[in-house]
Amino acid sequence: MKIRVLFRLFSVLYQRNLVKNMFMVTFMLITNLVLGFFIAFLQSESLIIPSLSTSYFEHLSVDIQAYERISSNNDLIAIKKYKRPDIDYLHNLMEHSGRFKIRPDYKEILAGSSLKLYDKELPNPLFVVVDHIKSGFGINNTYLELLKNEIAIEETDFLLSLNLSFNIKYEEEDISFVIKDDLPIDFIFKEPKYFATPKLYVPQEYIDKTIGALAVKEGLTLNNYLLNLKDDNSLTNYKFCVHFNSISQKESVSLLLKSGNTQDQGVEITSDAINKVNSFKALYDYLNILVMVFFVFIIIASFIMHIIVAHTSLLALQKQLALLQIIGGSKSDLLVLFLALSFFNYMLGLLSFFILPIIMPLVSYVLYLYLNVTITIFINVKTIISLIVVTIFILMTLIIGLFLFNTRRPLLYLLIDA
């Protein structure tokens, strides 16, 4: 049968079943859109997790601590004892990853601070010591909202005046002093919204020059006093504060630590940002499992729906196909005609993948509203092509099998039975 004749027959038969065909195209468009969103979600972890990690202002400043497992009467309960790692061990790490800055952890000291704004006591934020700002202090947007609730301040009040004061009392001997200082807030950082915590960013340089340089004894600064305390002393907060120079250096040290850690003992890096990223990753992995279940369900439902519609169309076309066979059409010609009718709808449904790039910015915007992190979501073209190729192969196999099963008797018998 000539191609021109096949094309005319295709046009006539497609228009006769236009309602069913439009229903099938609509179903395929919606199905492919949903599949595209699911593919984007499954592939977006490689973008979201790193973007979320680097979206915290203090992502290069971490705490480092050693742990060892303590045996208990219940094997199901794991008890860990924490202390500062040996400082020589940290210096050895520098031989493999380059130099980084090691400082005592001042969170235990800063936690005793008393903050005031316009002579009103404020709830303490989480004090975060960072190294990549040389001067000036900052707060995150969460703490700004807290301040707005406590005190009537405008959104544009970037320069605030906080009075910082604290006392330190040590168990063995009293070390008490008071610092009164004005902390001008130079910037407000928009931190990701995921479990956001009010934070005050303190430069390490300020700690070194003021608090750390305080003489707690004759000839002994607070910084040296903390460094020489036992590693399991509570005043050390059982940690060192480490400031990395780059993300690659941080990842290198993290891998080195993990390679040497065991279940019973090891050294780990922690921070508020790391804990939140790990929490989000665990949630994302759980959602991935749910998405995979729905993904498989939609693919199966799509195949079933396509076969049902194709089978219904075949039943409706069988008498026309029988007439075409009488006037000289071969069975292969009829199969080609039926495949063309089925796959034309499928190809129209693939238009969804051209619509997806237009919709993806909307997905990025939704993520921004939820996380306050700008992430450009895209779909891997190779994945889509692979999905289309596999789908076409499976559908072609099923439709050919459907055609051969329904035409196992000569089509002329349909006219005789009628």
Image (spheres, rainbow, N blue to C red):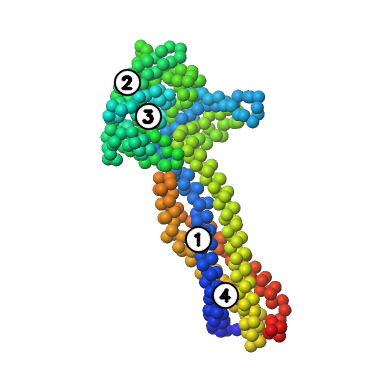
Q: In the structure shown, which secondary structural element does the residue marked by tag 2 occupy?
A: loop
Circle 4 crowding by C-alpha within 10 Å: few under 14, some 14–19, many from 20 = some
Does residue 177 sit above or below 8 in this rendering? above
* Residue 82 locus on image (x, y percent): 53, 25
* Mark 2 to mark 1 CA distance (whole Å): 60 Å
Q: In the structure shown, which secondary structural element does the residue marked by tag 4 occupy?
A: helix
Q: Residue type at mark 3?
A: Pro
In the rendered structure, which disc, 2 or 1, sits on the residue that comes first in sequence?
1
On residue 341, which mark appears? 4
Q: Residue type at mark 4?
A: Leu
* Residue 404 locus on image (x, y percent): 68, 74
In the rendered structure, which disc, 2 or 3, sits on the residue that comes first in sequence?
3
* Mark 4 to mark 3 CA distance (whole Å): 70 Å
Furthest-bottom residue in this view? 327
401 vs 252, nearest the viewer: 401
Circle 2 crowding by C-alpha within 10 Å: few under 14, some 14–19, many from 20 = some
Point out the image quarter for the C terminus: bottom right
Q: Are marks 1 and 4 in contact (CB under 8 Å)?
A: no
Residue position for label 1: 33
Residue position for label 2: 179
* Mark 3 to mark 1 CA distance (whole Å): 48 Å
Residue position for label 3: 123
* Residue 330 locus on image (x, y percent): 65, 82
* 3 vs 1, front mark: 3
In the rendered structure, which disc, 3 or 1, sits on the residue that comes first in sequence?
1
Does residue 180 sit above or below 250 in this rendering? above
